[in-house]
Image (cartoon, rainbow, N blue to C red):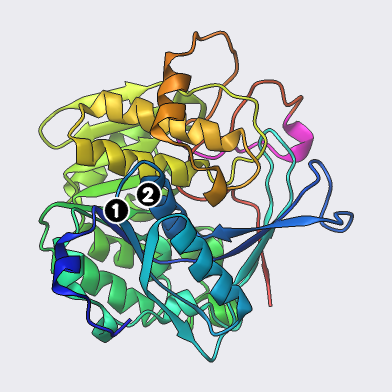
Amino acid sequence: MSRPSHPRARTSFDLITMGRVGVDLYPLQTGVPLAKAETFGKFLGGSPANVAVAAARLGRRAALISRTGADPFGDFLHDALRGFGVADRWVTPVAAYQTPLTFCEIFPPDDFPLYFYRRPKAPDLEIRADELDLGAIRAARIFWATGTGLCEEPSRAATLAALAARGRRGVTVLDLDWRPLFWGGEGGASAHGGRTGPAAMAAARPHYAAALAHATVAVGNADECEVATGERAPHAAARALLGAGAELAVVKRGPEGVLAVHRDGTTAEVPPVAVDVVNGLGAGDAFGGALCHGLLAGWPLERTLRFANAAGALVASRLSCSAAMPTGEEIEALLAAPPSRTGTGPSGTDPRPSRADAGPPSRTGTGPSGEEPRTEVPRS
């Protein structure tokens, strides 16, 4: 990560994302618990990595800042990033830790439990401020950081340094990306495995406030907005995010779609797009990459949200995350299709029903949340 970039690289990226990267191992059987699954697909994973892939699929020049283990899975991630057209020059190895793995179970339409293997510590939390290429970060048209990057040092200091280096120039996005399991008291998730509820929120909120002071765009669902601001109601949460420093607040509302409010008074609300859900885990990352695409294109806010919603819907209808990111042509075709389907469809957040309460998987969707669903089980 400390290697200097070529001078031309400082103006070459539409988007630089920073944070998690790892290997997703998804069972190739739907409706089967991990204990019974026999075959798995291996994919690039991690929300910031997937956002970069989604933007690259839409023709944007994208790069990732992260770290992997010095192991074969790390080699796989480099190959995958390059294959998707994402620059990996700032993805470097950490000899002390292994590349993280994430397993999931797939119970459509809205139950996708995740099992994280990130102990004793994930290498992506070893990003260091003194190794950042701040010139390239400043030069990127959009910089994208996540709340997860705030959960431990040295990643926390590096994330804040990168955000501060932007100086509120261009578009600086904070994906609120709330993961209670990664906020585990002293030492963070590496030491204790995380806390849930008010204690975890109280530990995280000051760090979110520090990051929001540098962000021009904030993106999150109800839980994430509550962590960052104390507000859950969509319009109140949007106002609170603007009050914390953002110029644009994007609040994802589950089956009610997405709300976006700009400081200049522009407001847009769009409904979800209905699909037959296969795996909702990458929908939020597709939403994020498409959101960046619309912001870069200078589209009106409503058009940007509709495009991003459709991108999330397409990924929810497919098995993988990174490999499922849609092209612009696919997104436009979905938007142009007649609204013959019914159901809640991909929206702005993750559904809450448990597997027992979910009902039949008929044309309902899980939402592009910017993070995966909430059932999270740490593994060491």
Q: Which residues are magenta?
A: 348-358
Whether residue 333 is situated above or below residue 327 in the rendered picture: above
Q: Amino acid at mark 2?
A: Ala
Whether residue 132 is situated above or below residue 353 in the rendered picture: below
Residue at image point 37% right, 22% down:
270
Numbered circle sitting on residue 332: none
Residue at image point 13% right, 29% down:
265
Q: Main secondary structure of the magenta part?
A: loop
The residue closer to the viewer here, 129 or 307, is 307
- The secondary structure type at the circle numbered 1 is loop
Whether residue 46 is situated above or below residue 345 in the rendered picture: below
Tags 2 and 1 touching, CB below 8 Å = yes
Q: Which residue is mark 1?
A: 61
> Quick one: which residue is furthest to the bottom in this view?
96
185 on left or right of 85: right
- Asked which quadrant contains residue 88, the reply is bottom left
37 on left or right of 333: right
- Asked which quadrant contains residue 2, the reply is bottom left
Check if residue 349 falls in the magenta segment. yes
**Residue 215 x %, y %:** 21, 55
Can residue 57 be seen here? The reply is yes
Q: Earlier in the sequence, mark 2 or mark 1?
A: 2
| Mark 2 to mark 1 CA distance (whole Å) | 6 Å
